[in-house]
Amino acid sequence: MKNTTVDKILDIVSGIKELPKGAFNIRVNGKSVKRSSSENVEIIPRPAGDGMDIHIAPGTKNEMVHIPVVMDASGMNDLVYNNFYIGEGAEVNIVAGCGIHNDGDHLTQHDGIHTFYVGKGAKVKYTEKHYGEGGGTGSKVLNPVTEVHLEADSVLEIETVQIEGVDKTDRTTRGDVKENAKLLIKEKLLTNGEQEAITRFSVDLDGENSSTTVSSRSVAKGQSKQYFYSVLNGNNKCAGHSECDAIIMDQGFVKAVPDVTANHVEASLIHEAAIGKIAGDQIIKLETLGLTEAEAEERIVAGFLGI
Amino acid sequence: MLELRDIYYEVHDDDEARDVNILRGVNLKIEDGEFMVITGPNGGGKSTIAKIIMGIIKPTSGQIFFQGEDITNLDITGRARKGIGFAFQAPVRFKGLKVYDLLKLAAGQEIDVNTACVYLSQVGLCAADYIEREINDSLSGGELKRIEIALLIARKTALSVFDEPEAGIDLWSFKNLVEVFEKQQREVNGSIVIISHQERIMEIADRIAVIADGKVKEVGAKADILPELIPGNQVCDRI
């Protein structure tokens, strides 16, 4: 990309060091700067330039799609609509991600509205990494909305990661799941300083034998605040599991609000929430292996978040 | 190698509103390369001594010397870096950390899978099944206990302290456990202190210390102490 900041952030949020293989769209400061479709994956920009429609052909196997977003212009507010149409039986790995570098004093914000139409029997993995950096006083804000519609027998696995630098995020993920389909959502989140993160999961298990596992592992450091709202509606014979597991440090704040509703006698729904500080004996154990207290905490947090 | 000099440890019992003396003037020396078993009745202070050696508990008074240096005020990390290792009676679980992660931390360096396998196989675990396992609730108490011992094998410390290593590993034969300690002593050439009630472990000790009521009641060669502890054994021997 010939821009060191952009290249670095691209690598952090989507793991790409050069132009990726397969289909991709790289969006920098509100504009698509590089785009490529592949034989099975067609990326069509929306006429207004505010996003794209991505069509993945039925039966596509083992393809990657990269759609990273980078912003390094302070004061920008970028709203993007991306629609994914995943054909029947397709197996695809989609890597999104957004990184903001803000050296200025103005708010920089990216709101990605993503909608997934997952065809019958398709298997999709969607990874979204959020990252912020920069020495300015301007906030870095990301408010993604992800809507997913799963047809029968499909599987969608969503993994979201936000480890550092994002001042505020309000993430909404809504899904409806048809028969024998499975929605897996895994969130990893670390907040620090004055940061605030809100997670809103809402899943309707509509089809017979539909299932979902919604899990969040998070660490709240400094004076940061996290809110976790999880709504599961069991509208048929189904299985739903919602799990919030949080480590709280310093003066951090974590609120977890479960909301599970069974509208069918064979709906089986579980919610688990565990919030607590790092256990003292975990630190002691790592100290006996030669780590300092700070090193032990760092290692425990990294292991907990899988980073 | 290690000397505990006049160690006292006092805690306040809130329920009874009084101070309780857990240790009352413990004096104990462990020599280079020595294999010592500390035994005695429950509640006598054995595990407290083990924790005081590692720095997990700070004594109310007294001094601790390790390789000639006063380490009384050294914290856990400092003692670990000087070559003291500790295996917990009740091993800790970690969400997210894997067996391989802890083995690498214990070894103090990157180790390859083959090396990790060697450590795990010594405690009777098949590395392929365990190396990527999280040290969480999915592991049984016995599995955790064996992993805890493997960590101390990986550390290769000058002094290894095992707090009741036999507890919870009943599915794994004592013979193997005893072999682990013998191998550890032979290969690392370090000293080993084991808190134990088990006769079969005491049988491989150089010396045995008996702790009761917060004091060293007796300390001496295995041949002198063991018959007093297990009189039935003498009868068996005679028969």
Image: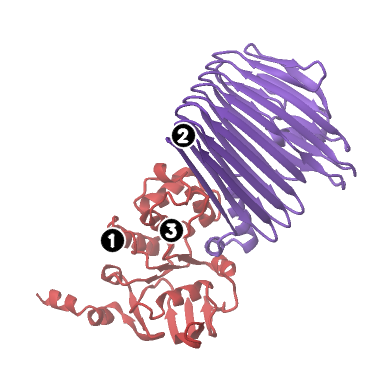
How is the model colour-coded?
by chain
Q: Chain of mark 2?
A: A
Q: Which residue is mark 2?
A: A264
| Mark 1, other Cα within 10 Å: few <14 / some 14–19 / many ≥20 | some
- The mark that comes first in sequence, 3 or 1, is 3
Judged from the image, the secondary structure of the residue bearing numbered disc 1 is: helix
Respond whether the residues carrying marks 3 and 2 are from the same subunit. Answer: no
Q: CA distance from mark 3 to mark 1?
A: 16 Å
* Residue A166 visible in this rendered orientation of the protein: no
**Which chain letter matches label 1?**
B
Say which element carries label 2: loop
Mark 2: give few (<14), some (14-19) or many (20+) Cα within 10 Å.
Answer: some
Relative to A297, does residue B3 appear above or below in the rendering?
A: below
- Describe the element under mark 3 as helix, strand or loop: helix
B204 left or right, relative to A84:
left
Q: Is residue B199 visible?
A: yes
> In the figure, the red chain has which letter?
B
Chain colored purple: A
Disc 3 designates what residue? Answer: B148
The amino acid marked with disc number 1 is: Phe
Q: Quadrant of the C terminus of chain B?
A: bottom left
What residue does disc 1 label?
B174
